[in-house]
Amino acid sequence: MTFEINQDVAFGNGTITNIFGWRTYEADSFGDIDSQPVWIFHSKSWTETEQYSNELRYSGVFADKAHVTAGLYYFKLDVDYHERRLIAGGANVFDGGGYYNVETKAVFAAVDYDLSDTLILNAGLRYTYEEKGAKIVSLSQNISGPAGPTCNLVSPEAGEATCTPDFVDDDNWSSVSPKLGLTYNLSQDARIYAHWTRGYRSGGYNLRNTSFDPVDTPGPFDEEIVDNYEIGYKSEYGRGRFNATAFYNQVEDMQRELNTAGPIGTIQLIRNTADADIFGIELDGAFALSDNLLLTSSIGWLDAEYTKVKADLNGVDGINSADKALDLPRAAELTYSVGLNHDLNLGDWGYMSSRISYAYRDDSAYTDDNLGVINDQKILDAGIDFHSSDNHWIFGLYGKNLLNDVKHGGDTQLPDSMGGTFAPLAKGQIIGAEVTYNF
């Protein structure tokens, strides 16, 4: 639920806006993690969350040059999470999870100042203060047999919680996020820009504490800091658009979830593992080849590497050069796509819209130890939609992954006793039809 109020004010010929949001969420899942014909490792989870947010901001223009935005932000989140792991047909049951509360307060301001008719200074600053608290029940500390679990958190059949947290802690973080840049308008439809920004990924706690080693506490892990340097070109013109960007990211205290095989399936630790540099180039565009035929395309290239490693990523001989030589997870070097969209007028019948697209993505590491890999992907999709002249009916035919390309990844590191690594497959070729009626 969101609720927004806008009030025009004389000050700076501006507008005061207040946006309030509330959301509640419940989910449960049950997975066959080992994917074997016999019951080796199954897992259930239940999650309940509730959050509130409120943003109060002002925007206005002063001296016909300074476009100012400033405001306050508040966010509150409560999470109840329960995970149950059932090993060997339920002979051993491990329960855990926890309660998590987050409170965030921020103040921000930004200005776009016209230095001339074509040159604009972009500047901004945001201060954020966060408090987080966690009460965690470690799965490794709560084991039972087929007769029933030793404790419950938010399981639908549990009623009142019966778990006693073995880890209770709270912490706070503060951060300052600046932005400084320039925009130069080449024309009404084209511009170039350059900027530097600093962003933060919040610190916190890990509710999935599965390690039996007392050294592996659920946290807190610290903030991740990213400095982004970017230069780019954006344009729109009568027959399409074209954008080009080059960026360089310096990442400090990278937050990663380290997955290793353990006695109850998978040990998942969240750590500040490394510093890294990421350089990339992206191009995308849309071009009208005719009045009813549109070509879309994009290409991206990425070069990512560790500059300093702070954790034993491969689990061999401590922190050394072999860890630094690993690939960053999910950082595919090359991606591109190309597509065509066509509209055909059918007179009194309505119109037909057809599309076809091809996308490619290089293979990339999935896990930090590089044992898990997402293979390269070649995806061909197509579809035809018939729209009735009264705009009520849509009859569609579609095909997804028409090349039937095998896609695997999302590897779960399991011990040999549970079948080793589990890498689920994405869906193969899909051909379907759908009918939509718009009232």
Image (cartoon, rainbow, N blue to C red):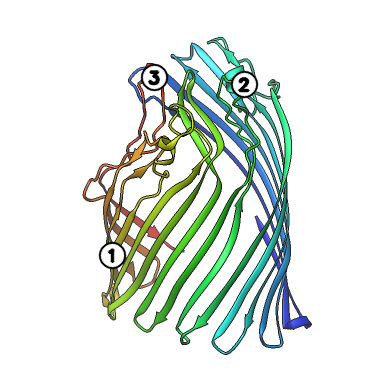
Q: Is residue 368 visible?
A: no
Local packing at callout 3 (Cα closer than 10 Å; few below 14, some 14-19, many 20+) is many
Q: Residue furthest bottom?
A: 117
Residue 376, given in percent of the width and then of the height, sits at: 28, 47
Q: Is residue 256 above or below residue 123?
A: above
The part of the image, by quadrant, that contains residue 57 is bottom right
**Which residue has dot 1 on it?**
339
Residue for badge 3 = 418
Inter-mark Cα distance, 1 to 3: 43 Å
329 or 34, nearer to the observer: 329
Crowd around label 2: few <14 · some 14–19 · many ≥20 (10 Å): few
User: For the residues marked 1 and 2, what is the alpha-carbon distance in whole angstroms?
Assistant: 53 Å
Viewer-side residue, 313 vs 60: 313
Disc 2, SS? loop
- Note whether residue 303 is visible: yes
Residue at x 36% of width, y 17% of height: 38
Residue displayed at 58% across by 14% down: 143
For the residues carrying marks 3 and 2, which lies nearer the camera in this image? 2
